[in-house]
Amino acid sequence: MSDLKQLRLEVHRNTQLVPRIQTVVDHQARGSFDLFADPQAFQRAAHDLGGFLEEFRTLRLFDLFDLSFRVTRRDGSEQLHPHLDKIESNGTSITIKVLTNLMLLKSLFRTGKSWALPFFVDEANALDRDNLRAVVDLAREQAFVAILASPQPAGVAEITYFPQSRGARVSIHPDIDAVRMLPADLPGS
């Protein structure tokens, strides 16, 4: 995704569930939630609601919507990913998940306030170097701090920490176990 121009999250209502719920909401909004005032309306709503509850004993928020991800590359080409689990590239899937979560988290914070929020990417080396660099750069631009975990140094982080065994404990001492890359050494600099 290092050639990413735009990522759009598209939300589609579940056409099986939402209309059933909307019927009840519409009755309430019109002030005609007293179903006993219209026996036929009561029978229809009861039958529909009964079928709904029989079919879906547990209703979760994510049952109501389908998410798809539309990726636009720098050359203008677009690709639609209807489900993250159907994406053939693990790197693309991880990148989309990170970008989506960062933007959702950012929307929760007030603008004009100074903040920096760390987030964790496990198995960071599952992303190719260009995608990982793009994720780290975007995170920094959006006031997030990427904490990358991988068996090998990723080579895109400003500071790399190497956990050390000290007696019966494994720890990281920031002054001893850290290697800081100079800006000129970082890829893309």
Image: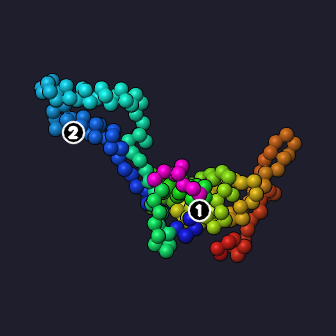
Residue 115 visible to the viewer:
no
Question: In x, y percent, where is residue 104?
Answer: 47, 53
Q: Earlier in the sequence, mark 2 or mark 1?
A: 2
Judged from this view, the residue extending furthest toward the left is 37
> Quarter of the image holding residue 185?
bottom right
Which is the main secondary structure of the residues drawn in magenta?
Answer: loop
Judged from this view, the residue extending furthest toward the right is 167
Q: Is residue 4 left or right of residue 129?
A: left
Residue 26's tag is 2
Q: Are marks 2 and 1 in contact (CB under 8 Å)?
A: no
Amino acid tagged 1: Val
Amino acid tagged 2: Asp
In the picture of the structure, the residue carrying the numbered disc 1 is 135
Residue 30 visible to the viewer:
yes
Question: In x, y percent, where is residue 163?
Answer: 79, 51
Q: Residues within 10 Å of mark 2 (few under 14, many from 20)?
A: few
Residue 170's tag is none
Question: In x, y percent, where is residue 153?
Answer: 75, 60
Q: Tag 2, which secondary structure?
A: helix
Is 58 drawn above or below residue 148 in the view shown?
above
User: Magenta residues?
Assistant: 82-89
The Cα atoms of the two marked residues, 2 and 1, are separated by: 43 Å
Question: In x, y percent, where is residue 118?
Answer: 60, 54
**Residue under the point 24% across and 34% down:** 24
Q: Is residue 166 left or right of residue 141?
A: right
Quarter of the image that includes the C terminus:
bottom right
Specify whether residue 35 is painted magenta. Answer: no
Most foreground residue, 2 or 160: 2
Most foreground residue, 161 or 41: 41
**Residue under the point 57% across and 59% down:** 92
Specify whether residue 87 is painted magenta. Answer: yes
